[in-house]
Image (spheres, grey):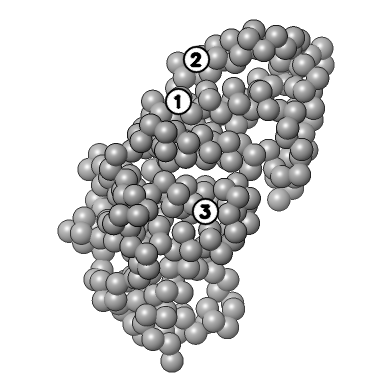
Amino acid sequence: MTTQRNDTAEDLILIERARRGDERAFTLLVRRYEQTVYGFAFKVCRNKDKAAETLQDTFVNVYRKLDQFDGRSKFSTWLYSIVANNCLMKHRRRNLDDESISLDSGFPDHEEPAEHSGTWNDSPIASVMNRELKEHLDRAIQKLPMEYRVVFILRDVEEQSAAETARVLRLSIPAVKSRLRRARIFLRNQLDPYMRK
Amino acid sequence: MKKCTQVLRFICDNLDADVDSPRCIEIHRHLAKCPDCSAYLASMKKTVKLYRNYTTGPVPPAVQKLLLKSLKEERAKSGKNLSHSRG
């Protein structure tokens, strides 16, 4: 918690210096958050090239809009919202992710957990991040509509709070919770046949 | 006594719920007696864990280089005169 507070204070100092034209302060901000942005973009896009492109777009945007950061939210929250918007916009504009199911077609309105679903294989092989498992994880999450994918990544993978996620995506907290529940069930069900082998 | 459907719904909503809440204690009691719900909870947690562990590694140096180049071009385009700090 203290570290977080120190990080926030240091961010504000760097942002202020960068606004006054300090190039080194801006570079320090980039260095500090490039991994967060790149990692988050990769988890959403599932593609290293797209993650690299998003990383560039994000920091160019940050550079252009640094004056608009009002300090009311954490700098990381602001960054997450730029990346999320970038990914959502690209996804809509270019229809990059052909495999994802449209919200209107195929993604169940009220997905419920299945009862008596059986036990997953708990052998070390099923947990080792090998190529086959990665392919299954990629395929499953690419089928998840982007609006749900971003919520799942922010909440469950990046471990942002429901309130923070709602702020990033400009959603209500109940909407975040509902999307998260459906995303969890969807992904779990997608992985189920592979994980029970 | 909770029904499995209620427990499963609770699990999907609250994977990281406060274990001391009365509702949570009731759920835990059910889970201890219901292998199906218990297996479902384990699979749900594993789904999250797998995605959490699937990372891409550090930003490649070539990507960092490209990023700095883009920012340099952006500075030139915008005409902002950023200077190096003395401190």
Amino acid marked by disc 2: Leu
Q: Quadrant of the N terminus of chain B?
A: bottom left
Element type at mark 3:
helix
Closer to us: A76 or A97? A97
> Does residue A128 show up?
no
Residue pictured at 24% horizontal, 58% vertical: A195
Mark closer to the chain start, 1 or 3: 1
Residue under label 1, please give it: A52
Element type at mark 2:
helix
Specify the subunit that label 2 lies on. B
Amino acid marked by disc 1: Ala
Label 1 vs label 3: CA separation? 22 Å
Place of residue A182 in the rendered image (x, y in percent of width and height, measured from the top left): 40, 62
Tags 1 and 2 both on a single chain: no
Closer to us: B64 or B82? B82
Q: Is residue B79 above or below residue B6?
A: above
Q: Is residue A174 above or below residue A167?
A: below
Q: Residues within 10 Å of mark 3 (few under 14, many from 20)?
A: many
Q: Is residue A4 above or below residue A172?
A: above
Amino acid marked by disc 3: Arg
Tags 3 and 2 both on a single chain: no
Residue pictured at 42% horizontal, 38% vertical: A92
Closer to us: A97 or A37? A97
Element type at mark 1:
helix
Label 3 vs label 2: CA separation? 30 Å
